[in-house]
């Protein structure tokens, strides 16, 4: 047997570009697991320090009102996976989980920001009719306008602190937009103690931010943590803008505003640092 053929059959070792690197994940606990696992497969030591939590609104009345009138809307626009989760949880509770089985002509079209939000929708058996090419609310609004939304009714299930960009731009283009708050983003100090300890010990190489809310919570909880020996990697320009506003230097911003993009940005920052 040819020894060379044996050698060729041996798979190459998986690249682990984050070996020896400690990465802090500040996302809400329910959202952090997948990111943490993927970073660990790349060799990172991951500290899961959730600094925010997502909670459905305590009063479902306004959401129930629009659910009773779904046939009135031409589009439902989602700018986060959290909005999808909370919206459909209430649909199930209301016994309306047959939405995916309805003919396309008997339900609104769905517009979403990014692949992650699209995946959340597909878990419910629904394919988005529009996925913004850039995972930003501004881009989703622009692409909806290009499709022609004048005089059309758009439902916008949202977080309480969501930006007003999408409804404002759509209304300026002649759409009729109805917003309904389906979740709240709250500060969570569950991850504060281990995070403060790791920062004080200089044991952190990368801190990741997946939203402006995580930046604000981080700043409030760790502003007394001493010198910044770590790098910050952000999921997108809005998050980066908030970090800069609060006095942080951002080493890298994900080009694609998704978990995949965030991981690429982390690897790039580590390689650039050498």
Image (cartoon, helix red, strand yellow):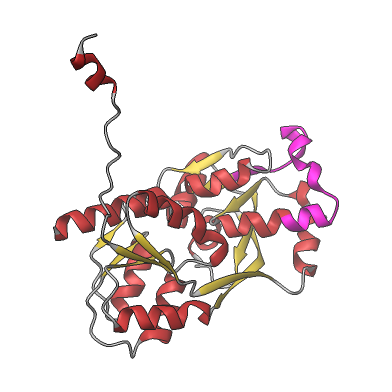
- Residue 145 visible (yes or no): no
Nearer to the camera, 41 or 243: 41
Q: Quadrant of residue 54?
A: bottom right
Q: Residue furthest right?
A: 95
Position above or below: 227 against 75:
below
Residue at 78 percent of width and 46 percent of height: 71
Residue 200 visible in the snapshot: yes
Query: Going by the picture, which residue comes out furthest to the top?
Result: 1
Residue at (48, 44) in percent of width and height: 115
User: What is the residue that sits farthest to the bottom in this orientation?
Assistant: 224
Q: Quarter of the image holding residue 9?
A: top left
Coordinates of residue 93 in the picture (x, y in percent): 82, 57
Q: Quadrant of the N terminus?
A: top left
> Where residue 82 appears, x then y in whole percent?
59, 59
From the viewer's perspective, tell me whether residue 102 is left or right of residue 249.
right
Q: Nearer the viewer, residue 65 or 244?
A: 244
Work out whether residue 16 or residue 60 is closer to the camera in this orientation and state it: 16
Does the magenta portion include 235? no
In this picture, is 40 found above or below 183?
above
Q: Quadrant of the C terminus?
A: bottom left
Looking at the image, residue 104 lies above or below residue 230? above
First to last magenta residue range: 89-110
Q: Residue at x 36, y 55 (%)?
A: 262
The residue under the point 49% across, 61% down is 32
* Left or right of residue 32: residue 120: right
Percent position (x, y) of residue 167? 55, 61
Q: Nearer the viewer, residue 20 or 113?
A: 20
44 horizontally vs 274: left or right: right
Residue 153 lies, in percent from the top left, at 66, 51
Give yes or no for residue 106 being in the magenta stretch.
Answer: yes
- 223 sits to left or right of 193: left
């Amino acid at each position: 047997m040819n020894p060379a053929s044996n050698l060729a059959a041996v798979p190459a070792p998986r690249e682990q570009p984050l070996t020896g690197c400690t990465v802090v994940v500040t996302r809400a606990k329910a959202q952090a697991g997948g990111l943490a696992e993927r970073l660990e497969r790349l060799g990172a030591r991951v500290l899961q320090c959730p600094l925010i939590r997502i909670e459905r609104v305590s009063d479902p009345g306004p959401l129930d009102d629009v659910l009773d009138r779904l046939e009135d809307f031409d589009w439902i626009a989602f700018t986060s996976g959290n909005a999808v989760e909370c919206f459909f949880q209430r649909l199930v509770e209301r016994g309306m989980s047959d939405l995916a089985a309805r003919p396309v002509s008997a339900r609104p079209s769905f517009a979403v920001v990014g692949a992650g939000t699209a995946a959340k929708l597909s878990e419910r058996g629904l394919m988005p009719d529009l996925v913004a090419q850039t995972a930003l609310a501004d881009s989703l609004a622009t692409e909806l306008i290009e499709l022609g939304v004048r005089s059309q009714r758009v439902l916008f299930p949202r977080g309480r602190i969501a930006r007003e960009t999408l409804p404002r731009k759509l209304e300026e283009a002649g759409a009729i937009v109805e917003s309904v708050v389906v979740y709240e983003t709250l500060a969570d100090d569950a991850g504060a103690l281990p995070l403060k300890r790791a920062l004080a010990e200089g044991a952190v190489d990368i801190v990741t931010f997946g939203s402006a809310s995580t930046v604000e919570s981080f700043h409030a909880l760790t502003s007394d943590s001493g010198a910044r020996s770590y790098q910050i990697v952000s999921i997108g320009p809005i998050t980066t803008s908030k970090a800069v506003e609060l006095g942080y230097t951002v080493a890298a911003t994900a080009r694609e505003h998704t978990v995949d993009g965030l991981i690429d940005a982390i690897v790039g920052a580590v390689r650039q640092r050498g």
